[in-house]
Amino acid sequence: MRELSVEKITQAVADLCVEACCRLPEDMRKAFATARDSEPSAVGRDILGQLLENADIAREETVPICQDTGLAVIFADLGQDLHITGGDFTEAVNLGVHKGYVEGYLRKSSVAEPLFERKNTGDNTPCVLHLRLVPGDRLRLRLAPKGAGSENKSMLKMLVPADGLEGVRKTVLEAVTVAGPNACPPMVVGVGIGGNMELCCLLAKRAAARDLHSRNPDPRYAALEDELLDMVNRSGIGPQGLGGVTTALAVHVEWAATHIAQLPCAVNINCHAARHAEILL
Amino acid sequence: MSDVRYIKAPFDEATARSLRAGESVRISGVILAARDAAHQRLCACLDQGEPLPCDLQGHVVYYVGPSPAKPGQAIGSAGPTTSGRMDAYTPRLLACGLRGMIGKGYRKPEVVEAMKQYGVPYMAAVGGAGALISRAIKKYTVLAWPELGPEALALMEVEQFPAIVVIDCLGNNQYEAGQAPYKKL
């Protein structure tokens, strides 16, 4: 059986933290440039230009694109034929987050307990870990730091079958409209449809963390992604909410089987700092 | 952008009242940095009748929680945080003489009413442009509550800090005015 040491996992996570927070994916950077050329609002064009400059400074100087380096959300796909050696997997991942955020000069935004003391843990642990067991003998780690400006604008509607496609459209538009400038547009909008309450939210999160130009493999849902993007960009919100046609750079939809009485729909918005980094170990 | 207005902070009353929604500004001087936890503590001081760590008169507050400075940097990335989370505290601080606010996002109607009452503008910096904005911040000095880390109350020396006036002291709102022409739903 193939083996992988916890030390390797820790170092990989630490590297992913810095990579994700300081180096905006190239497809996002290109999308800023494309949007700047087509945005009719002068203020919007100016903002998109500033976002390009910001991404370049962050990459050149290895400083965070945005000071809110988020909670570290980690999607781990663990091959069932891989044997992890030398310690506890979750501890190893959190040690990587500690190392990445402390040594990488990233902001520590995690409080240990939410309601009474809200004391900062000082190293951005614990991360939010989504672990899936998959075929094979590899470990895929995808880290998507998520800031609060956009996360606070998440929405879940427990729609019913009669709400249908129109219910989904209304939910997405409501989420984006309520979010407005607070979620730092241009956004990447993640939409989850189906499943149950918690699965639907996770679908939306996975959708928001997808690569910018990825498309749902089902052509019906891919067409829905296009339709929702067009709708969102007719909201008028524009870059930073100051008006324009570039409210979102993408809408991603993920779906799952659901109950005969249910049509849950969740929206998870990513700000323009739609950060993620991935490694296959 | 054309027609950029260069202004000094802290603000005098005339400057604060003359700023208009939609104007691009570059702010030089000294501004305060405070976000959720510092606002809560400022209001706790007021509740208990204790003196504030600094006189708010004329000050512009920037809602920010910077990332740590690397060696040789004055500050880490330092873009604006969501202003709405400060709404619950804002009217009381405006009553204490606060003269301007920089952040991002919508404000509650009661905050806009207080801005009109006290003659205070609200400005937006580009959210998520923390690396770029940090270049306008020359010095970062913690004033109080260092245990709050990125949430400590601090003073910032800024040079040509870029912002856009979003809501002015007459209640004009650039989010509304800017979005309206592009809304096609």
Image (cartoon, rainbow, N blue to C red):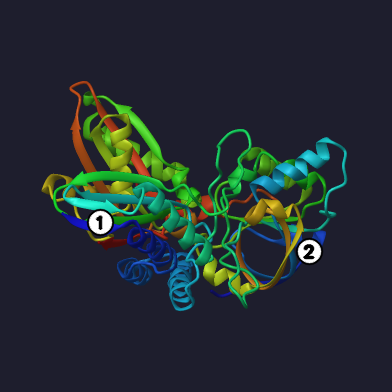
Single out the mark in the foreground, 1 or 2: 1
Q: Nearer the viewer, residue A119 or B47?
A: A119
Q: Which residue is mark 1?
A: A140
* Residue at the (73%, 52%) spot, across then down: B120
- Going by the numbered disc 1, the residue's amino acid type is Arg
Q: Residue at x 13, y 45 (%)?
A: A220
Quadrant where the C terminus of chain A lies? Answer: bottom left
Q: Say whether mark 2 and mark 1 are on the same chain.
A: no
Observer-nearest of A214 and B27? A214
Label 1 and label 2: CA atoms lie apart by 51 Å
Viewer can see residue A280: yes
The image position of residue A90, as x and y in percent, is 37, 47
Is the residue marked by circle 1 packed among few (<14), some (14-19), or many (20+) residues within 10 Å?
Answer: some
- Three-letter amino acid code at the position of disc 2: Pro
Q: Which mark is residue B10?
A: 2
Q: Nearer the viewer, residue A149 or B96?
A: A149
Q: Residue at x 63, y 69 (%)?
A: B75
